[in-house]
Amino acid sequence: MHILVVDDEPDQREMLGGFLRKQGFTISLAATGKEALTLMQQLNIDLALLDHRLPDINGDALLLELLQINPLLRTIMITAYGAVETAVSVMRSGADDFFEKPVDLSQLLARLKTLEQEIMVDCDAAEVGAALSLESDLPLKMVGKSPAMRELLSIVRRAAPTPWTVLIRGETGTGKELVSRLLHLLSPRREHPFVALNCAAMPENLVESELFGHEKGAFTGAAGRRRGHFEIAGGGTLMLDEVGELPLATQAKLLRALQEKKITRVGGEKEIAVDIRLLAATNRDLSEMVKAGTFREDLFYRLKVIEVEIPPLRERREDIPELIKALLERHGLEGIEFSNEALNTLARYHFPGNIRELEHIVQRASTMARSSLIQAADLPGEVRFPEPNSDGSLEERLAAIERRILIEALEKHDWIQTRAADSLALSERVLRYKIGKHKIHKP
C-alpha cells in the first residue's frame, strides 16, 4: 500500500514516514497541500495521512481536492488533541478515520492494516465492475456498493479464473445463479456453455439421467439416446442449484464424475470423458447434513474448495436504492421513482425473500401506485407494518438487536467512536471490537 504523509512539521512527518516504511508500506512525504496535490496526480496513492492544519490549505478542503483526483482514496486525518468539532468536521468531509496528537502508533498501524484489506477488496470489486460494464448476458447486474457486496465481488474476482469447484451459499432469493453466471463470465470458459440445473425440481428417478444422460431403452420412456448436462456443458460451466437435494446414491456418482472426469450414461457401458467446471449452490447447511448422514462428507469437501456466501438483503440495506433503480430499468418502468419516505420504509423491512421479494414489491408498487412517484402508502402492508422477524436462533436475533443499537449510537454521534462508546457505557476498545464483529462500516 502506498501512503502519502502530509504534515508541515518536519520531525512529525519524518517520524511517521520512517515508522510506516519499517512496517513495509511505500511512503511519500509532503509538507504542504500543494505538494500533496502534485504527488497525488503523479503517483498511485492508496491512502493519505493528513495533518488537519497546514500552512496553505485547510485539511477539509485538501481532503475534498484529493478525493476529486482519486475518489477511491482512503484518508486518515491527524487532529489536535481534544478538538471534537474538528473531528466531526473531518468525518463529514469523507475521512475514514481521525487520530488525535500525539498519535498512538500501534493503534494507527492496526487501522492501516484494516484499511489495506478494504483497499484490496475495493480494487477487486472495481475490476469486476469494469468487466461487467461490457456484459449483456446477465439478467440483472451485480448491483451494490455496500461493504458486503464489495467483499463478495472481491472473492468472485479471485475465484473466477481458477479451475476449482465453488460452493455458493445463500438464502433463497439472494442471487445464487447470478453469482454463478458471473463466475462463468469472468472465467477462461466464458466462450463455452453455461448450464444450470435445479436439483430440487427433478424427480428422484430422473436425476441421474439429467446429469449423465441415458441410452435408448435404459428405462420406460427412454425412446432414444440423450445427452446429460455434463455433456451439454462440455468445455464450460455446470451449475447445480439446490445441490443438497441430491439423493445419496447420485451423490456418490457425482463425486466419481468430478474425480475421474468421466461419466457413464444411464443404461450405457462406455465411459465418456467430460470437461466442465462445477459450481454448486444451496440454501441449506451442508455441514449439518453431513452430520445427519444425508450428505456425503467426501462430496461436501470436494464441492467447497472455494466457498462463496451471498449476504442477505437485510445485511446490505444501503444497496436498496440502487437495486430498485436496476429493477425498474429491467422491467422497462421508465419515469417511476420511489420517494425518500418509501425508501426509508423499505430500509426498515427485513426482506425474508431477499432480492426476489424486492423485485415483486417493485412490480406491485409500480402497478398499483396512482402516480409515478411511489410513496410509502403504495407499498404492501407487510412492508409498512411488518411482523417481528422471528427467523434465526435467539443468539442471532440478539446479535441483530446489538448491531442496530451500535449503528444508532454511531449515527447519533456522527460516527465519532469515542463519543458513541461513552453513550453506550463501553470502552473505545470494546466498541471497536463489536464494530468489527458485526461488520459495521461507516456509510
Image (cartoon, grey):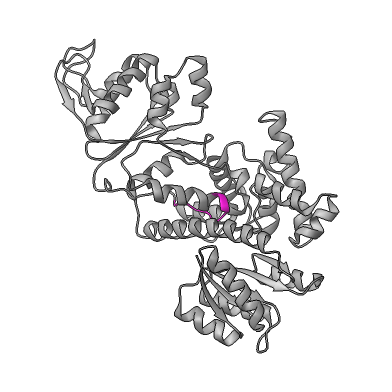
Count the marks. Answer: 0
Image height of 442 relative to 17, above or below: above
Image height of 10 relative to 124, above or below: below
Residue located at (58% from left, 44% from top): 313
Residue 185 x, y percent position in the rendering: 33, 49
- For residue 95: magenta? no
Name the residue furthest top. Answer: 220
Residue located at (64% from left, 59% from top): 443
Name the residue furthest bottom. Answer: 56
Residue 54 x, y percent position in the rendering: 67, 84
Q: Quadrant of residue 275?
A: top left
Q: Which of 225 and 184 is in front in this view?
A: 184
Q: Nearer the viewer, residue 217 or 37?
A: 37
Please give the range of residues in magenta: 141-148
Q: Can residue 286 be seen in this view?
A: yes
Image height of 26 relative to 11, above or below: above
Q: Can residue 345 be seen in this view?
A: no
Name the residue furthest left. Answer: 270
Residue 412 x, y percent position in the rendering: 79, 58
- For residue 145: magenta? yes
Residue 347 x, y percent position in the rendering: 67, 49
Task: From the viewer's perspective, tell me whether residue 235 is left or right of residue 104.
Answer: left
Predominant SS of the magenta segment: loop
Residue located at (59% from left, 75% from top): 5
Task: From the viewer's perspective, tell me whether residue 105 is left or right of residue 256.
Answer: right
Image height of 326 relative to 44, above or below: above
Q: Nearer the viewer, residue 259 or 313?
A: 259
Task: From the viewer's perspective, tell me whether residue 224 is left or right of residue 301.
Answer: left
Task: From the viewer's perspective, tell me whether residue 317 is left or right of residue 300.
Answer: right
